[in-house]
Image (cartoon, rainbow, N blue to C red):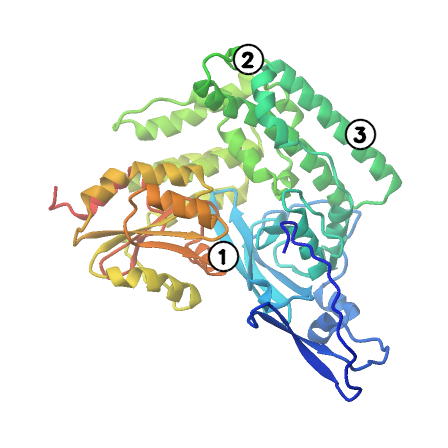
Amino acid sequence: MPDSGDSTFVLIFPPFDKKMKKFDYIESDTGEGSIFGISLKKTKDQKKKPVEESIYGTWEDMEKQLAAEADPSTGYGTDFFRKDTAHLRGFLKGYDPRAGFSTGMIYTGNELTREDYPTVIQIHPDGRFEADFLLNHPWEGYISFKRTSIPFYIEPGETLFISLDWEDFLMADRYRDRRYEFKNIDFKGASAGINKELNKFKVNTFNYRNFEKQLKTLAPAEFKQQQLNALKEADNSLAEKLKQNTVSIKGQQLLKNKILLSFYGALFDYVMTRRYYASQDSTNEILKQPIPNDYYNFLPKINSNDKSLLVSNMFSSFINRYEYMGPFNNADMTFTPENKLEMFSKGWLRKDSVLRNELQVTPGLLFEIAKTRSLNYALEMLTSKEGHLLAEEINNSISEPFLKEETMRMYAKKFPEGEKQAYKLPDGKATDIFRKMTDPHKGKFVLVDFWATTCGPCIYGIKHMQPLRDKYKGSPDLAFVYITDTGGSPEESYNKFISENDMGDNLFRLPEDEYNYLRQLFKFNGIPRYVMLDRDGNVVDDNFPGHNAEYEIQQLFPDKK
């Protein structure tokens, strides 16, 4: 097959016997390969019942079972935050198990606390798929099938049905380095209307393709003005579309938020990313220019109490950049082992002052979310008593009831009553896959590293741990196991990397389907991710701090130097 993945050909055969009803065609010169059965029977033209209807009922039945269409006259109310399970049901028309994948992923998570909840989508041989996952609020996410992503919108407690066409997947594969918009998607359920709107109306967002060039050639004020102009143009373009079409209140909110989060997120990214390039190139005069005092004066234009911002699939990166923006970093306190609690406690008081006095922004929901998110990291550095004091302090400083609940839940999760115990993995397919790689090392502690050649922090971590691997090489106490997948680590780059780095013998490159199950098992979207097992194969820590691996490993063997 050509590189494009496309091929057109004609099969010419001599006349067949009239009695012949079918024949098999082998796609191979050697007699080995794919076999296609070709029928010579004539079929009557008849309207066949779609397969998805034979499985789920008619579209009308589905609509009645799922719910009524969302009310286009209303936006998000007081019940925005509500923890409940969402149900995705769907059908992939034309799917063939021989396609090379039988699972997909939904990379769900809790952006309020930095927790990941990736969910495996199991595709049945007939093309059905389903997934159930926990949500805290309405959410716009993606279904990912073999690196092809399909956006969708859903709310807690809802069931959404999606019908996809295999022809779209073939087109997406042909586009390769370009994003392909699926043409043949149908939705049913309470949020079907919003999904159709978001699928129909495309908005202009920041294009990262030329981002590096812009960093090196545009001064901060120039870049900022360029993006504000582009944002205004995108808003105006959307306004014209909304004049000509009826779009629900929620749909309008989400489309406008996508534009805002995209361009404002790029303004954050510019500051954060240029630090790296400045450290790599000391001769670039543009990169030496300081950030002007008024650079962040776009912040007051954001409604920081607008809960609908959380719905967007762009919110994750935006809130991360907000939490670590320059003015906040400058307000962070240094600390010693004795004043870690003070660092976190007073640090947020100083950030509150920065927000009010320097940036002219009244702290709202965004600031409260940033506080809540920080707790996860802070608790890793505090004792149980210190952690409880900090959790209560944050709890008392925020007004959103749902965030209050999340702060105390995070503390209870980190410091459960009684001593934290290693846990056994649940029975199931994911555990079976994992045990095949780790059971040979029972009797030792096992550090499992989920990584990829396409992940920069993963590569750094592997190289950084080389002295540690050397130290424990052949040890009866500790083994290292490295797990990646075919999608994240293409064969050529994988073979090159492991040949150049002494990672030991416990190296596994899994099919993407198997790796998906491990993501779900250990609840991680991003990598690197480290998991520590005890001598019995139980999980000591499913989010082991790899950055501090040497110290943490030493705690496992206090009697050994």
Is the residue under label 1 in contact with that under label 2 (CB below 8 Å)?
no
Q: Is residue 362 visible?
A: no
Provide the residue designation for mark 3.
236
Viewer-side label of 3, 2: 2
- Residue 368 is left or right of residue 39, and the answer is left
Which sits earlier in the primary sequence, circle 3 or circle 2?
3
Q: Residue drawn at (76%, 61%), measured in percent from left and top? A: 68
Could you say which quadrant of the image residue 237 lies in? top right
Relative to the observer, which residue lies in front, 180 or 6? 6
Disc 2 packing (10 Å; few <14; some 14–19; many ≥20): some
**Pointer 3 local density, CA inside 10 Å: few below 14, some 14–19, many at least 20:** few
Given residues 497 and 153, the one toward you in this image is 497
Going from the N terminus, do you reach mark 1 or mark 3 first?
3
Residue located 75% across and 74% down the image: 13
Answer with the quarter of the image where residue 203 lies: top right
Residue position marked by numbered label 1 in the rendering: 512
Residue tagged 2? 286
Pick the quarter of the image with the C terminus: top left
Distance from the alpha carbon under mark 3 to that under mark 2: 31 Å
Q: Position of residue 543 (x, y in %)?
A: 36, 47
Q: Secondary structure at mark 2?
A: helix
Report the residue at 85% width, 78% height from top: 46
How packed mark 1 is, by other alpha carbons closer than 10 Å (few <14, some 14-19, many 20 or more), is many
Query: Looking at the image, do the residues carrying marks 3 and 2 touch, with CB atoms under 8 Å apart?
Result: no
Residue 222 lies in what quarter of the image?
top right
* Residue 545 as seen in the image, left or right of residue 515: left
Q: Secondary structure at mark 3?
A: helix
The amino acid marked with disc number 3 is Asn
